[in-house]
Structures are given as structure tokens and as C-alpha cells.
Image: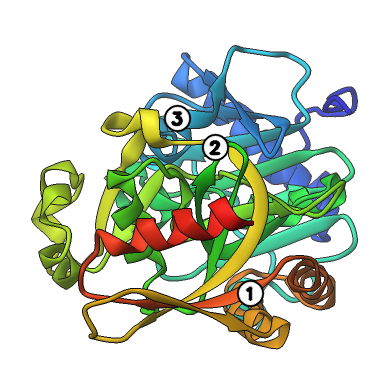
Amino acid sequence: MAVDRSEWGVVSTVAAGAGPRGFFAVVYATFRRAEQAAGNAAEHFYSIGGHTIRLRFAGPALAPFISPALEHLAEQPNRASELDVCLWDSVSTGVEMPPPPWSTDDYVARGEVRGYNDERIRTVFQLGPGILNMIDLARNAALFWIRDATAVPYYESGAPLRTILHWWMPAHGCHLVHAAAVGTPGGGVLLAGKGGTGKSTTALACLSSPLLYAGDDYVLVSAAPYPFVHSLYNSAKLDADHLQRLPHLRPLISNAGRLDREKALIYLYRHRADQLTTGFPIRAILLPQVTGQPHTTLHEASPAASLAALAPSTIFQLPGAGREAFEQLAELVRQVPSYTLELGTELSQIPEVVLALLTEA
């Protein structure tokens, strides 16, 4: 469904009122002013989970902090976008955000704003970096604002627009999942577990093998007609102390001067484009565990163990995630087998074990 822009226009704060739809209209009108002030709006198109997404940047300042993680999904300009995301910052455009009509008491879990989330409008304000995410699900239009583009946190650059895509995708057959994924065109594995269990190490260890990389932190999963993982970001994030096990990745790091306070961030499209994939059928769910032993081994696991690895980290990290996300994950773990992947210190064995599993599947 194409984005409907027929009713958009400049709406004053007074006329719009203070409700969620009114405030969305005010912020959208402010974005339009920022677009005009910048004088050179840029449009970027991406195919994400099989859907055409258009990013509209007011000026050039913000794009370098948002686009790199999505570069592998870029497509030619297409006016029939299914979702429009409008992005701007105030410092480069000189256009300030309207004062929000809520109070500090209205902030709840994960940055959601009480009274500004309903069946149509979703709103999150990240107090730390000062980022506003809003979406109008009926209009297939979303808004992203930060005061200063140069203040975009590294984790936002590594997984840009995560909240907006999480809101929009379920109605279009996909769900955002906190997991990694590697495989072949014929099928692959979903790597599940909370931070520190070895998802990223496993995915990055597979870069030296025939396995293709679909993501190491967040991916999209669809269930019909069969379980399928769609790549979302080509970025990889790794704790600095884990680089000792993967030293060949050190020259690829984009934030090498800030590893004392940030995870290492690598945009693989710029260095390993041939090992990226847009997705593959899911043949199994693997639950990595660091053992300290030399050899990597595989053992059968229960669907309940997979659900326990996938659901909490997905639901707790994504605003508004709840019963629907849980039910989708529960259905997924019933459809494919699960295994515990006990990670050995000999990293070359990890892709060998995964490939052997996929060959047998």
C-alpha cells in the first residue's frame, strides 16, 4: 500500500491540539519546515523484509549516522514506498522541535509516553540521547528527530530506526527479533540468547567460512509460508575485549578511538559485502554458550529453552512488545528444531559445526 500524503499540510500547534494525532501532525509540519530550510532534502530507498521503505532526510547531516547499517538493502528510488520515515536534526537545519505536550511524569518503560500511544500513533522519547520516534500506522509515516546529528549514539547508528521498524513490521508479516543469523541461500540458523552468550562471536567467526551473514544482534523473522529470517542491519557490534579472539576484524572498526566507552562497530557492507545475505529459510535455532573448552559441540535443546532465549531479550528491549511478539516466537520455536551450541576456543570449528548441521537438515 502506497503512503497516503493527500491530507498532509502545515498544521499549527494550536489547531492540532495536544493528543497523539495532533502532536504527530505538528511534528510532521516541523519536519517539512526543516526540509525547506535545508534546501537539499535527500531520499534513500531500502528493501527491508521485502518492503520498500523510504527515508527522507532534511539536509545531509543525519544520513551518515543512519544509512551505513542499511546500505546492503539499498534499492533504486521508487515512489511507491510502503513506509516513509522523515528524519531531521535541529542543529544543522536550524528548526527546533515543538515542545512536547507531556510532562516528565508521563515517561514509562522503554521511553514510551503515557497518553501518546494508541492503536494508531506510537511515541517513544529516549531521554538519554534526546531522540523522538513516532509513527502513524494508518498513514504509514514515521518521524525521527534528534537535536544534533553528531550526537547520534553508536548503538543507534548500529541499529537505526529499530523502534519504528518494530512498530510497523508486524502488520506486514515480519517481527523484529533480538538474535543473530548465519546460513546459506538454502537455509540457515537463528542464534538466540541474551547479551554475552556468544551470538556476535559466533556470527563473526563464520565470516571466514562459506556461511553468509544476516545479522548479529537484530533480524526480522516471518512465519509464512515457512520460517524465514530477513537481514536488517549489516553492522556488527563486539565487546572490545572480545577482539582478542577476532584480531583480523580490528582494521574494520569504525569507532576505533572510542572503544573505552563503546562496543566495536563494524559496517560489513564496506568490507565483506560478498558475505552478506538478505535472508534465508530458518532450519534451526542455536543457543550459543561459552564453555572455555577447545572444541565446539552441538546438543539438542527444547523449544522451551529456545523461547526462554528469544522472548525476554526481544520483548524487554522493544517498546510496545508484548503478547503478540511472544506468541510469534512461541510459534517459531515449535516449527524448527533447537540446539545448544557449546562454543569452543578454536573459533574455526564454529562454522564447521554449523555447516555440518545445515548439511544434515
Q: Residue at x 47, y 14 (%)?
A: 40
- Sequence order check, earlier mark of 1 and 3: 3
Q: Amino acid at mark 3?
A: Glu
Disc 2 designates what residue? 87
Does residue 352 appear to the left or right of 6 in the view shown? left
Secondary structure beneath label 3: helix
Q: Amino acid at mark 1?
A: Ser
Residue 104 seen in the current view: no
Question: Which quadrant is home to the C terminus?
Answer: bottom right
Disc 3 designates what residue? 71
Residue 18 position in % (x across, y down): 79, 60
Marks 2 and 3, how far apart at CA: 17 Å
Does residue 304 appear to the left or right of 125 in the view shown? right
Residue 136 position in % (x across, y down): 80, 47
Q: Nearer the viewer, residue 125 or 266?
A: 266
Secondary structure beneath label 1: strand
Q: How busy is the neighbourhood of tag 3: few (under 14 within 10 Å), some, or many (20 plus)?
A: many
Q: Residue at x 70, y 54 (%)?
A: 221
Q: Residue at x 44, y 36 (%)?
A: 276
Residue 114 position in % (x across, y down): 74, 76
**From the viewer's perspective, is residue 256 above or below residue 106?**
above
Marks 1 and 2, how far apart at CA: 40 Å
- Sequence order check, earlier mark of 2 and 3: 3
Labels 1 and 3 touching (C-beta < 8 A): no
Q: Amino acid at mark 2?
A: Leu
Q: Nearer the viewer, residue 256 or 197?
A: 197
Q: Nearer the viewer, residue 311 or 351?
A: 351
Marks 1 and 3, how far apart at CA: 31 Å
Disc 1 designates what residue? 338
Q: Nearer the viewer, mark 2 or mark 3?
A: 3
